Image (cartoon, rainbow, N blue to C red):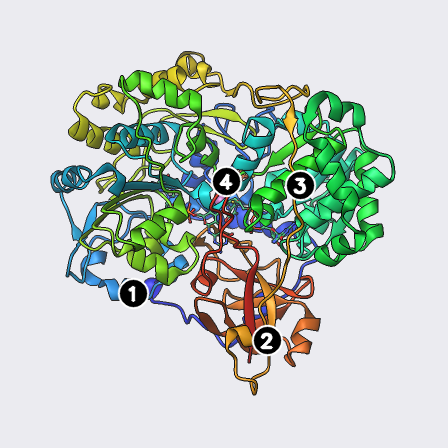
């Protein structure tokens, strides 16, 4: 193995102290430094070319880029490209994986690689297969790939499944679901099942629409943002510009988060070089550091304070909502003690939050994974949206509910029908297209897919991007589950852990694909703000390779399996014809029919509510009572620890470092949290001392599925009782407990035992 692919010491003993210091603000000069290093390096020209390409940013769903140019957001403001975007592009413009790499490295060697090392192997540039009983991936011809695929996809439809991750285009997503549903399978698992599905399910029930009801324009009119369970400085950096501007115009930001994220206290944005970059801008007006998993209690508390202080918008509730009486009764009847004990915040703190909300003209409630990834994720969403409604903050300019979406096109995937909860209108349109009904067998979401595979119920899996293996809890189970599947196809741009650990029983095939700025035809994507972007065609820098576009692969496969039914599949290789189909069958996407001629990017119809007339049958929002969760923790005994060993039980939050994109790690350390490498646990000094430990001491962290040893303690501003570790590494130690209403795992509240 050559130097750059050698497995790193996974448990380094000495922290690199130069990288271990706690900055007093997020963003700032390190961002400029990063830009400079990359844009002035040998990759610089290609990086600039890509940044200027007319396509949406690859990284997050904030949706910068598109036809107005690489640096422009949807309201036309420039300088909106962040360092994360550079990070993502820089990974995609790597040279290809070396020619003989897979011949020279066995699977067991590849399994030693860390996430970062796998990513740094370079771009995948030729298809490979790992055959049953073999030790090495080997090259495979396209002809054989299609041969294997044709028989793999002819299995019973219930035994065929897909998983996808929202980096690819709407066109690829549409093809994927049309092919799967025509084959008779509804098993369209997607990364959103592990991400914002709780928001989609909750918001759809309340408002009849599962996405954000706020446009970027509307956000710019708010005077208060309640930011719940989001680390936007790392994961949606351009949202920080909006928060800075809001504070500058006198607005308030209420942050709800068990961890004091430095960038949420103060953020230095390069978009404002004179006013923000050097000294930073204050973000949080109020920081509520609650117990992980207790958001329902906090929001019921805010509701109670609104009631007690006579701040409810009763006329609004009567006119535009239903079910409000029960929600008010519940908040009234719930004692303050129960609320404060569950969330760990005081009554005065909660009352201040309520007053801030009530005294603002327009409040936007925004949230991310700290809200959704809980076993009561849907209740969390209900509780937040109830609060928005009780204070009259839904259905007007400058107000509303705003889930902050993850992958750059994850929302587009849902819109295109890659979901196990297909909208009735799409179902009907597809049935019309097919001339018959769709299968009524319910599909598998991501967790059910793993469980079904584990039970031997899946023969064939196609993964359009992503890393199903490492995105799941209980990595050993995920590995065993994937190992039961006969054939797996991974369509991917770069190697990842899943390609080396998520191996099928017979054939695992990796298919190298073109990314968003390399496709031979135009594509579209959808931002979290419901804005459809048009991405220009482009070229790849990989000259010696056999890359394919996702659309070409899927349409060829479908043509071989389905002939001309119900469409001329091969004709769809020109994506403009897929856009015609989308315009015909997906409500709100009518403008897709003309986007090729007009180039006009657009906001999807019936999703942004500036009037309190919602997309439900009655036009009213439905409110639901949200029971306060019982947040107990297992005891030392439950973990089976002998009494002689001293340990403590904490609630572990598993999240992203400041330098990773989901399961893909870009840098080993986390500068902003002062974590020198990934084998650390961030905890409150008080908790460490109660265990009798000092900073940098090594401990074992044990969950219900396994343990990680030799983990370095780092002190941080985490709420007592809680701790932080990075995903995907931490996913090996805990089993999935999910919200039964949507299947999302409780990644943000994992009980762990810590002992030395
Ligand atoms: N650079 C970069 N950008 C990304 C990604 C990336 O990995 N890297 N991933 C993309 C994707 S797919 C997604 S889904 C998003 C993720 O974006 P985020 O949701 O911001 O990501 P996380 O790192 O999971 O951080 C969740 C935050 O929730 C807080 N939290 C944890 N538990 C609780 C709780 O019980 N209550 C509350 N109120 N807060 C809690 C954590 O302390 C943390 O600050 O980002 C997208 N953008
Ligand atoms: N413990 C814990 N687990 C979590 C989470 C957590 O917070 N804590 N977060 C969850 C969340 S929110 C999510 S979204 C999932 C993420 O889960 P996934 O979406 O499954 O994983 P990613 O790491 O984003 O996938 C990265 C891979 O996508 C491929 N890729 C990149 N671009 C393209 C493209 O254009 N086309 C194709 N075909 N492939 C491409 C590359 O090969 C890359 O290695 O993880 C979930 N798991
Ligand atoms: S905020 Fe998100 S979409 Fe905008 S440039 Fe940064 S990573 Fe890209
Ligand atoms: Mo996500």
Compare marks 2 and 3 and give the one earlier in the sequence: 3
Q: In which quadrant of the rendered image does the C terminus lie?
A: bottom right
Frontmost residue, 185 versus 650: 185
Residue appearing at x 40%, y 68% in the figure: 8
Q: What distance separates the C-alpha of mark 1 from that of mark 4?
A: 42 Å
Rendered location of residue 163, percent (x, y): 35, 42
Compare marks 1 and 4 and give the one earlier in the sequence: 1
Residue appearing at x 41%, y 60% in the figure: 474
Residue located beneath label 3 in the image: 383
Q: Residues within 10 Å of mark 1 (few under 14, many from 20)?
A: few
Residue located beneath label 2 in the image: 696
Q: Residues within 10 Å of mark 2 (few under 14, many from 20)?
A: some
Compare marks 2 and 4 and give the one earlier in the sequence: 4
Residue located beneath label 1 in the image: 2
Res 515 quadrant in image? top left
Residue located beneath label 4 in the image: 197
Compare marks 3 and 4 and give the one earlier in the sequence: 4
Is 78 above or below relative to 188? above
């Amino acid at each position: 193995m050559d130097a750059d692919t050698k497995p790193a010491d996974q448990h380094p003993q000495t922290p690199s102290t130069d990288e271990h210091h706690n900055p007093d603000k997020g963003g700032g000069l390190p961002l400029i430094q990063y830009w400079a290093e990359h844009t002035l390096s040998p990759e610089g020209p290609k990086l600039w070319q890509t940044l200027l390409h007319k396509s949406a940013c690859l990284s997050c769903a904030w949706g910068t880029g598109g036809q107005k140019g690489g640096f422009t957001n949807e309201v036309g403001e420039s300088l909106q490209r962040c360092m994360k975007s550079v990070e993502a592009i820089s990974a995609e413009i790597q040279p290809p994986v070396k020619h003989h790499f897979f011949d020279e490295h066995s699977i067991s060697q590849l399994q030693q690689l860390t996430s970062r090392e796998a990513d740094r192997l370079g771009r995948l540039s030729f298809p490979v297969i790992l055959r049953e009983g073999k030790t090495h991936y080997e090259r495979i011809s396209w002809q054989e790939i299609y041969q294997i695929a044709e028989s793999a996809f002819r299995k019973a439809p219930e035994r065929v499944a897909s998983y996808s991750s929202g980096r690819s285009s709407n066109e690829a997503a549409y093809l994927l679901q049309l092919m799967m549903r025509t084959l008779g399978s509804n098993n369209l698992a997607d990364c959103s099942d592990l991400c914002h599905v709780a928001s989609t399910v909750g918001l759809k029930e309340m408002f009849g629409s599962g996405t954000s009801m706020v446009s970027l324009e509307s956000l710019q009119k708010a005077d208060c943002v309640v930011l719940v369970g989001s680390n936007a400085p790392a994961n949606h950096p351009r949202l920080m510009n909006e928060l800075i501007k809001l504070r500058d115009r006198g607005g308030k930001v209420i942050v709800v988060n068990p961890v004091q994220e430095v960038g949420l206290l103060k953020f230095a944005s390069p978009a404002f070089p004179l006013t923000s970059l050097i000294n930073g801008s204050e973000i949080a007006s109020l920081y509520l550091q609650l117990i992980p998993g207790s958001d329902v209690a906090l929001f019921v508390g805010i509701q109670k304070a609104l009631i007690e202080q006579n701040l409810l918008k009763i006329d609004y509730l009567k006119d535009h909502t239903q079910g409000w009486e029960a929600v008010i009764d519940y908040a009234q009847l719930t004692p303050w003690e129960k609320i404060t004990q569950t969330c760990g915040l005081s009554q005065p703190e909660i009352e201040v939050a309520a007053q801030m909300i009530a005294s603002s003209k327009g409040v936007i409630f925004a949230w991310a994974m700290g809200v959704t990834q809980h076993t009561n994720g849907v209740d969390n969403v209900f509780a937040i949206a109830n609060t928005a409604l009780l204070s009259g903050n839904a259905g007007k300019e400058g107000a509303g509910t705003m889930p902050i979406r993850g992958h750059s096109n994850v929302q587009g995937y849902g819109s295109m029908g890659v979901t196990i909860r297909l909208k009735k209108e799409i179902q009907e349109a597809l049935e019309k297209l097919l001339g018959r009904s769709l299968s009524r067998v319910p599909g598998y979401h991501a967790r059910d897919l793993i469980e079904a595979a584990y039970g031997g119920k899946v023969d064939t899996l196609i993964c359009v991007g992503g890393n199903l293996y490492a995105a799941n809890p209980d990595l050993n189970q995920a590995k065993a589950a994937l190992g039961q599947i006969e054939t797996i196809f991974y369509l991917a741009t770069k190697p990842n852990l899943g390609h080396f650990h998520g191996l099928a029983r017979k054939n695992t095939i990796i298919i190298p694909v073109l990314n968003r700025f390399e496709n031979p035809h135009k594509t579209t994507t959808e931002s979290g703000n419901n804005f459809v972007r048009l991405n220009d065609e482009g070229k790849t820098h990989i000259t010696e390779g056999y890359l394919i576009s996702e659309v070409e692969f899927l349409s060829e496969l479908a043509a071989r399996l389905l002939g001309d039914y119900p469409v001329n599949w091969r004709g769809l290789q020109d994506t403009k014809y897929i856009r015609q189909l989308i315009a015909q069958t997906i409500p709100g996407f009518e403008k897709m029919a003309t986007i090729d001629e007009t180039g006009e990017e657009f906001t999807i119809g019936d999703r942004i509510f500036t009037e309190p007339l919602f997309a439900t049958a009655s036009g009213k929002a439905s409110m639901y009572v949200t029971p306060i969760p019982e947040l107990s923790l297992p005891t030392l005994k439950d973990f089976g620890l002998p009494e002689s060993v001293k340990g403590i039980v904490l609630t572990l939050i598993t999240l992203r470092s400041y330098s990773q994109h989901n399961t893909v790690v870009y840098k080993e350390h986390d500068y902003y949290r002062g974590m020198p490498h990934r084998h650390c646990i961030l905890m409150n000094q008080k908790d460490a001392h109660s265990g009798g430990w000092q900073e940098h001491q090594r401990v074992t962290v044990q969950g219900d599925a396994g343990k990680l040893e030799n983990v370095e303690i780092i002190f941080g501003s985490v709420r007592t009782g809680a701790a932080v570790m990075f995903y995907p590494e931490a996913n090996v130690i805990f089993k999935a407990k999910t919200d039964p209403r949507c299947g999302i795992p409780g990644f943000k509240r994992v009980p762990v035992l810590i002992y030395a």
